[in-house]
Amino acid sequence: WARTQAAQVMQANKVNLMQIDMMQLSVLQTRMDNITMQSTLTMGFALAMFGGETLLPLVEDEGVVCIYKTWYHRMFAVVFFFTVVVTLSLSLLVVVVTLEVKQLAQEAALLVSTNAAVARARVHVRAMSRCFKCSICAFYCSALFLLVLYVGLPKRVLQQPPGEDHESQERMLACIDIEDRNVLDSAQDFGTVLAVMISAVGLPSSRCSKRE
């Protein structure tokens, strides 16, 4: 009778521990749902920065907020696009990996053990939480640099034709001199390098999220 009673107590303890683990797993899954939703919203806001209303004025070669005017306009543009791509990449990584972790945690709880499922899920939740915080920081930085591009930098720059020393030949341009072939080629080269850089940053992260 004593052995039977001890076995029943041990079985009850195992059931209680399993219920506690399932409650912890449910809490972690709720947290993963919140992280996924917030990352999706962040990704949507970041994608809006690549929309026509935001992007088109920056790349117009005759617009007052174009990014081709001076070296510091180009520098801020590079940092802006870089932070937007980092935001998109981290948000996508969080969404994809979190969904995968939720599914694997449920399978592990059924097939392996609830304790192991909770332990592994907790590790991944912490990692994804850090990635989400980094994406928020990158998004905040991108918003600040966008504000600098639109408001903080000069709208017009002084341009003087080569070889001309007379002040009467100086002009205030909104962006670049579209009649100067060299200037147009330089702007085109900058745009090409910028696009390659964005692709180089974004593609590896998307592949990594798919692999996860």
Image: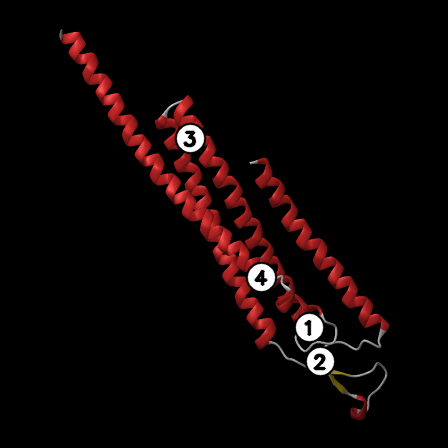
Residue 111 screen position, x and y as percent: 42, 22
Instruction: Evaluate if marks 2 and 4 touch, with contact meaning CB atoms under 8 Å apart.
Output: no
Residue 207 screen position, x and y as percent: 63, 41
Crowdedness near tag 3: few (<14), some (14–19) or many (≥20) residues, C-alpha within 10 Å: many
Of labels 2 and 4, earlier in sequence is 4
Q: Quadrant of residue 161?
A: bottom right
Say which residue label 3 marks.
106
Disc 2 and disc 1: Cα gap in Å?
8 Å
Of labels 1 and 4, earlier in sequence is 4
Residue 138 screen position, x and y as percent: 52, 57
Disc 1 and disc 4: Cα gap in Å?
18 Å
Q: Which residue appears at 60% of the width and 55% of the height? A: 85
Residue 182 as seen in the image, left or right of residue 11: right
Say which residue label 2 marks.
174
Residue type, mark 1 in image: Cys
Say which residue label 1 marks.
66
Q: Nearer the viewer, residue 161 or 180?
A: 180
Disc 2 and disc 3: Cα gap in Å?
58 Å
Secondary structure beneath label 1: loop
Instruction: Evaluate if marks 2 and 1 touch, with contact meaning CB atoms under 8 Å apart.
Output: yes
Residue 4 as seen in the image, left or right of residue 156: left
Secondary structure beneath label 4: helix
Q: For residue 48, which numbered disc appears in the image?
A: 4
